[in-house]
Image (cartoon, grey):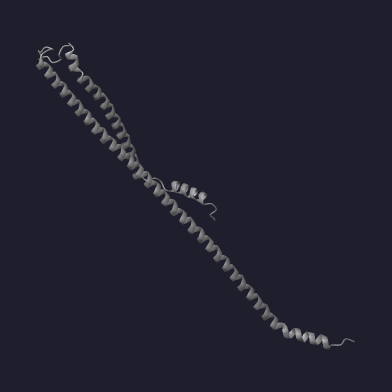
Amino acid sequence: MGITSEDSVSAWAEERVRSSRPVTNENIILSAQVFKLAARADLLLFFFKFLLVFLGGCCIFATSKPELTNSGLADPSPSCSWTSGDPTHTIAMATLAKMDSMRGQGGIQMLLNAEQEAQQIVTAAKNLKMKRLRQAKEEAEMEVANYRSYLEAEYQKSISESSGSSNSTVKRLDTETEEKIQSLKGTASKVSPEIVNMLIKYITTVRT
């Protein structure tokens, strides 16, 4: 088995890790909680913005009541019996207008604070989600690196085993060849006197 391409090995290892190592229940639950928290924070922020606009309109309507009363309309307070030209009436209406304005500003400030808190919740949820995604990416890269190291070790092991097997085969053949050579030498040494005598006999014998 050879490693031909870095990209192909990385892609194959990542696919092998995803298929062989399932996502744990803890990771699934944590991811679901993070996304649920982010969704709730976004919804809460939208609600506070809507409430801020609504109360802002109510405050504008409330601060315009003294002007309508001074222009000749009936005073909404049932216990008020002042006339429009009475200085006491003017002071009272100015005081009411100031109180309404203060209440309106206090409500707006509360809404602004609530919106800021909601924005902080949304930011914290997004940061937590990004942190979890980075952690998951780092874990996946670590798994890919470990699996790549495992494949490389297996490849080197197969190469060493193949090389060792070839060396043992060569040694075995050398041993067998040497044994055959020694066997032939032994056989030749045994028949050498007979061959010499036979040759001498043929040479010295004269045919008539």
- Residue 182, image x and y in percent? 65, 78
- The image quarter containing residue 129 is top left
Q: Foreground: 170 or 34?
A: 34
Q: In this view, does 59 lie above or below 137?
A: above
Q: Foreground: 194 or 89?
A: 89
Residue at screen point 24% across, 31% down: 112
Q: Foreground: 195 or 108?
A: 108
Residue at screen point 68% across, 80% down: 187
- Residue 68, image x and y in percent? 19, 14
What is the tally of numbered marks visible in this picture? Answer: 0
Residue at screen point 35% across, 44% down: 132
Give the position of the C terminus as an image quadrant.
bottom right
Q: Residue 42 vs residue 185: left or right?
A: left
Q: Foreground: 73 or 129?
A: 73
Give the position of the N terminus as an image quadrant.
bottom right
Can the viewer see residue 29?
no
Q: Is residue 8 above or below residue 167?
A: above
- Residue 156, image x and y in percent? 51, 60
